[in-house]
Image (cartoon, rainbow, N blue to C red):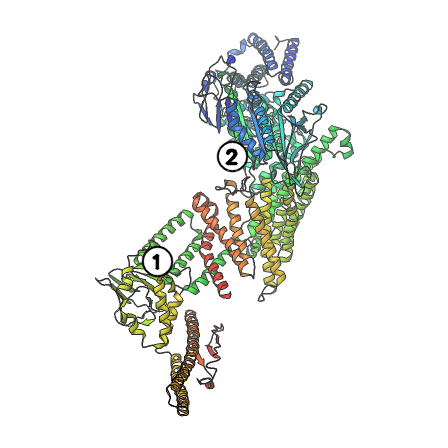
Amino acid sequence: LGDALVRRHLQELNTKCVVEMEKNQTILHPAGANLGKGDSRYVFAYDFCFWSMDESEKDKFAGQEVVFQCLGESLLHNAFLGYNACIFAYGQTGSGKSYTMMGSVDQPGLIPRLCSALFERTVQEQREEESFTVEVSYMEIYNEKVRDLLDPKGSRQTLRVREHKVLGPYVDGLSRLAVASYKDIESLMSEGNKSRTVAATNMNEESSRSHAVFNIILTHTLKDLQSGTSGEKVSRLSLVDLAGSERAAKTGAAGERLKEGSNINKSLTTLGLVISALAEQGTAKNKSKFVPYRDSVLTWLLKDSLGGNSRTAMVATVSPAADNYEETLSTLRYADRAKNIVNHAVVNEDPNARIIRELREEVEKLRDQLTQAESLKAPELKERLEESEKLIKEMTVSWEEKLRKTEEVAQERQRQLESLGISLQSSGIRVGDDKSFLVNLNADPALNELLVYYLKEHTKVGSADSQDIQLCGMGIQAEHCVIDITPDSAVIITPYRNSRTCVNGSPVTSTLQLHHGDRILWGNNHFFRINLPKRRTRAAEDEEGEGGVMKNSSSSEQLDADGDSASEASSEVSFSYEFAQTEVMMKALGNNDPMQAVLQSLERQHEEEKRSALERQRQMYEQELQQLRRRLNPDRQSFMGGMSHSTSAQSRLKQWSEDREAVFVRSLRRLREQVVRANLLVQEASFIAEELERHTEYRVTLQIPADNLNANRKVCLSHTHTCTYTHTHTHTHTHTHTHTHTQS
Amino acid sequence: MASLSSAEWRALCDKFTTAQNLSEVESRKDPANDPFRSKYKARELLREIYCALKSFETTEGENESGDQRPTEQPVDGEREDGFGRGFNGDSPAGLRAAKLGAVEYYLGVNHIETEELSAGQEHLMNCMKQLEKCSVSSENVSLYIHVRNQLGILWAGRDETEKAQGFLETAESIYQRYMKEVSLVLAYTHTMYYLAQVYKNLGEIERAATYCHSTLQRQLLLNQYNPLEWALNAATLSQYYITKGRYMEGRHCLSAATVIAGLAGEVPSEAAAQESETERERRDQLRQKRAEIARCWIKYCLNLLQDAEKLLQDNIGELDTERQEELKRARRGEEEAEEKDRKSALLFGSEDTFDSIASLEEKVRCLFPLDFTEARAVFLVGQTYVTQAKEYFEIDGYVTDHIEILQDHSALFKALAFFEEDLERRCKMHKRRIDMLEPICNDLNAQYYLLIRRQLMFELAETYNEMMDLKLSLANRQADTQPLDNHTIKKFNHLCSSSAKYFQMFLDSLCSPEGKFPERLEEEVLRPALVARFRVARLHSRLICSVPSAQLDNLNKSLDNYKYVVEYCEAHPEAVAAVETELELSQEMVGLLPIKINRLKARMATNN
């Protein structure tokens, strides 16, 4: 918005030139007569400045084509997108306003170029389903009254400016004439200009005191050929010739709001303007007021051009002659202020304190849920949440302060994490193939494998500050254990006394070598998996390391087998948190759990029964064989047949016992899984109870109907009812309830 | 005086009248290429008068020259009031000096009007010198004031506001010292008005408003005003007072405006308007100005309600009953103070209008309403003016004005709803707002009314949100422990998605013609746009939904919008200050929502 254009007929130029242009700046030098005002020069910046004083100065001179390229083309483009565009021309009479807008036959101005380009484009884009129509209207605004310049009879009658909810602001009764070429437009314009002159003469007015608005209305019709429906896009191009700047103040229409700041209006008729200005100025924010100052007809008609999506350009023309210094200065100032007359409609929003509060509650709730679930598993996360909580409490602190604090907190956290031995280079475990490190395991996928602890030659683990890997939480000792990397690159874990350390589910009390993929549990809930560099994973493997501990416990075999095969396939993904946790549970079952006794007795009983059943079966087959042998000749063939019979009988026996075994093992495994799951739930319940300081103890009990404990019966185990709660004085029930139904 | 014959004097007077006529009347017809033709002619005549006067003076004034005081140059803008020295203003010598001064004055004004400022200044200063010679009298006081008014204007035009202030304040004090009881001088009204402008330009808005008030008061006293114009000015001044929280003054201006506008006569009938264009114009003017005064009244009622609301609300925008009690107790004293204030306030009106202004004032209080009954009284007055204003500003022809009135009406309902304790009724008030805004918002041409539509969309979104919250509290209040029934859930979801829909429409309106959301938000839409995103995020997570996949969808949409706020502020740190709280919470939610989403996903996975 805003251009300044220097233009002057050369022959008139007999005074000093006081205007200079440099890029987008226009500089006004003090003129002789005005030197008294101080010799400061004025510098104004606009979007474009065009110098067109002397055609021989090729590098400076901007012709009509340049002006059109800078202003016209983007406006035209916008019009074809369906948006309104507007060009205001403002300047002293004789400064080249009409030359810029209309031009001459050889040097057409903005309007002819714009119109030609418009018609060219409509022809280009014309299709069967797309058509364009162009209409024009031409009006004059004099003394706040609108006259139709295209209606031969209507120039005396004043028209009313109105607004329509779909059509926008419009002039009631203004003629709109269809045109097909720029020729049509040209002749209509010249006719309009004639009637403007006639009217001015008749009413003893001056055309330089009136504004002329020429509208080009482009209607773009899109037709859907199949359905026969059509839609329209209408855009308006307004070309406004503002009253000569020397008269603008006197006409009052354009100038009032843009008047110089410190002038005093003499006439009391302007009291309303002064009061309006006070009412507008003295406004506190969010105060709603109505200042009944009617916008001038012109600004009102073009209000959509002064805000929103419309493109608006203002062309200000100035004379470079020292004689016109005052006018030039006022025009440049006017153009400078014009940049600010864009409409701003402010969206007044309601105070949203309640919405903020509700959301805060939600944040709290989410955070609580998270804390509850994670408090035992990831103390680090808890810390992070506490920090967030602090942040939220500090809402009142100024923003700068908050930023600074946040920065501090972040740095502090970074230091903390570093001191905890957590790698900050990256999360995830794909880092450092050549390094040994621990990675955390967590039930929540979002938190799983988030922390990476690199192992040094001697890594101390525990809750004390002196430790390399600092953990805290249930069951973590101040000095919990040590992991060493030996010179031959073996990784060895040495737990301290009374500290719970499990490797692959089995408690470790003495030094043990670790292997790639081993699961480590410290305390109650710190699960990690160890990653070793490739060459260490299998090369240093020795049989007894893993097998030694596990072979004693037949119940673990299945799991270990699964684990091993998985570790061979891809150690990174398969050792999930659940796996590690179950592993620990399963192995814990092996020792002191009363449940395990039950299971073991079941197994023993099964073995017993298996043996006796097999024995009976064997005896039965033996008997059968004996009989057969006795009945048949001891002839070779029949012996052979007998042998084959006996073989088939034996294989049948084997088949039967294998099937039976498989069923049993499957059932038992399933039962065990159920027990583990129940145990987990019970453990969690106990933890929560402890957290809430409720004295509730949870225990898993296994109830097996006595008559089901007969391995010979078809139904091996059924209705394993694992249960549940004993609560003392609380009103909240934590209810762990699993229902297992195993059939074989 | 003897040497100036009465015939000569009359000739001079005629010459002066011709000069005045040339300067004031003929000059308006001057052609553009010779704009000051008549002014120059007038100047010649004034010069002739001056010479004539001067020659008489010298022949006659010889005997006086001896005791003429040595000239003491007055300094520009110096606060000297030029009385108590020189000749008595009414003495022949004093009168002569005053006459010369007057001609100098007119010459000065003439030069200023023809843009010869320095010459004009010289003449005005000569006038001051002439006036120096005599004391202020009832004959010359006008000149005393006029010359200073002119010098005030001259210096203000040169950006020397303080100098202008000096001259005008001197004029004021001269008037106040000599004219207290005597006649009413129009020049002084001008002094008031010029001072108002000087103070406005100096940024002393409150003093400027006081002088505007005085100007209006004097116009009324001198009976020199156009009723409609005066009324509109008084109504406009009320808007200044209202925004300053001075409701009593605001109400006084408005009541006076209504009464004085009534003096402009009956509105011509429609039939009469069709007969002649003058009648049509008169009818239109009367109806328009009265409708505009009605709109000023609406703002009075609205601001009074809104300010009371602000005063009474707690930190989450609900009625603070303790505060309410406290304010009610405190008010007893205030009512007596009102009477006092009243007397000290600048009152408008003559004997015949005073009573009607006072009785109009009694129709609405100027104290903050403190409970529903009081608020309702203010609301109803406001609503009456809404109806009145809408009669002229119909949707057909006055789209923008009409909608602005609707927005005020809606705001009146909203403010009243604050005082309403019954949630059901409160909800109905908000429904009324929706009913009046929604159809028009959807009817408007998006191109021409882009900005006003944005306002409407935002307000509709907020209103739906408000209703949603109310419905929920109502349901929770009725059945505290039970889960929401299907009907309520449906209703809740409808309100929730309607709110989100309008916020989204608002956001869509910011897109470029090609449908692209801007990378950088304009300053005036920055906060609204980010708040809209934030609210859309919130609304999506509030939709009640039993289908996990849809729920997941909503949570993801919610997360996306929170993320937008966070990411926008990261990319444009200057935006942070505009949405501090929203940003903090968005950051929080960006951290927490993924966990919620993961849980939901996990639950969906186990259920499958």
Give the structural element (helix, strand or loop) at label 1: loop
Percent x, y of residue B568? 46, 46
- Labels 1 and 2 positioned on one and the same chain: no
Q: Position of residue B20 (x, y in %)?
A: 63, 16
Quadrant in which the N terminus of chain B appears: top right
Q: Which residue is mark 1?
A: A429
How far is disc 1 from disc 2 in space, using C-alphas?
Answer: 69 Å
Q: Disc 1 or disc 2, which is closer to the eye?
A: 1
State the residue at coordinates (36%, 61%): A572
Q: Amino acid at mark 1?
A: Ile
Local secondary structure at mark 2: loop
Residue B326, label in figure: none
Q: Which residue is at the front of the view, B449 or B595?
A: B595
Query: Is residue B216 visible in the rendered structure shown here?
Result: no
Given residues B184 and B490, the one toward you in this image is B490
Res B312 visible: yes
Q: Quadrant of residue A134?
A: top right
The answer to which image quadrant residue B92 occupies is: top right
Q: Residue B515: x and y, percent?
A: 54, 42
Q: Amino acid at mark 2?
A: Glu
Please name whichever residue, A420 or B45, is drawn nearer the observer in this view of the structure.
Answer: A420
Q: Which residue is mark 2?
A: B204
Is disc 2 surrounded by few (<14), some (14 to 19) or many (20+) residues within 10 Å?
A: some
- Total marks shown come to 2
The front one of A463 and A680 is A680
Q: Chain of mark 1?
A: A
- Reply above or below: B146 against B206: above
Residue closest to the far left = A487
